[in-house]
Image (cartoon, rainbow, N blue to C red):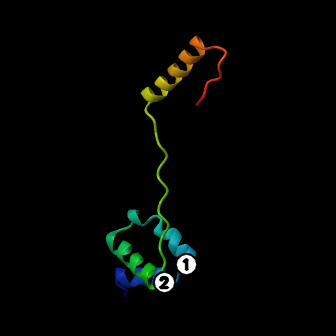
Amino acid sequence: MRSPEQAFRAYYASMTDADLLQTAANQSSFIPIAQRILVDELGKRSLTPLPRPAPPVLHSALWVLRSHLAGFTRRLYHPHHPVSS
């Protein structure tokens, strides 16, 4: 019977570099032993995962309302000038 460590090592070793890098993009959701062995396998192959893109900026409803009101006010007081965003 295989230990979890042996199972993870065999699984990651069987992956292509591309699959391993794609898997590494989600490693923060893995259990610690899976993360550690994934890092080991990446190191054996001299692979560096790409940094995760920053999450999109979420604005509060108040910020959105303020932006809309500011645009409306500009159009109200300066109707002939285009609104710049």
- Residue 7: x %, y % from top left: 41, 82
- Binning the other alpha carbons within 10 Å of mark 2 as few (below 14), some (14 to 19) or many (20 upward) gives few
Q: In the depicted view, which residue is nearer to us: 77 or 64? A: 77
Q: Residue at x 44, y 85 (%)?
A: 44
Q: Amino acid at mark 2?
A: Arg
Residue visible at 46% across and 69% down?
24
Closer to the camera, 83 or 47? 83
Q: Residues within 10 Å of mark 1 (few under 14, many from 20)?
A: some
Compared with 50, 70 (above or below) is above
The amino acid marked with disc number 1 is Asp
Distance, label 1 to label 2, CA atoms, is 8 Å
Q: Quadrant of the N terminus?
A: bottom left
Q: Residue at x 58, y 12 (%)?
A: 76
- Seen at 43% across and 26% down, the residue is 62
- Circle 1 — which element? helix
Q: Are marks 1 and 2 in contact (CB under 8 Å)?
A: yes
Q: Residue furthest bottom?
A: 1
Left or right, residue 43 beside residue 79:
left
Mark 1 vs 2, N-terminal side:
1
Q: Along the horizontal axis of the image, is 76 left or right of 54?
A: right
**Vertical relation: 25 (above or below) 59:** below
Quadrant of the rendered image containing residue 74: top right
What residue would you read off at disc 2?
A: 45
Q: Position of residue 28 (x, y in %)?
A: 39, 63
**Residue 2 vs residue 13, the one in the foreground:** 13
| Element under disc 2 | loop
| Residue at the disc numbered 1 | 17
Residue 18 placement (x, y as % from top left):
57, 74
Work out whether 6 lies above or below 33: below
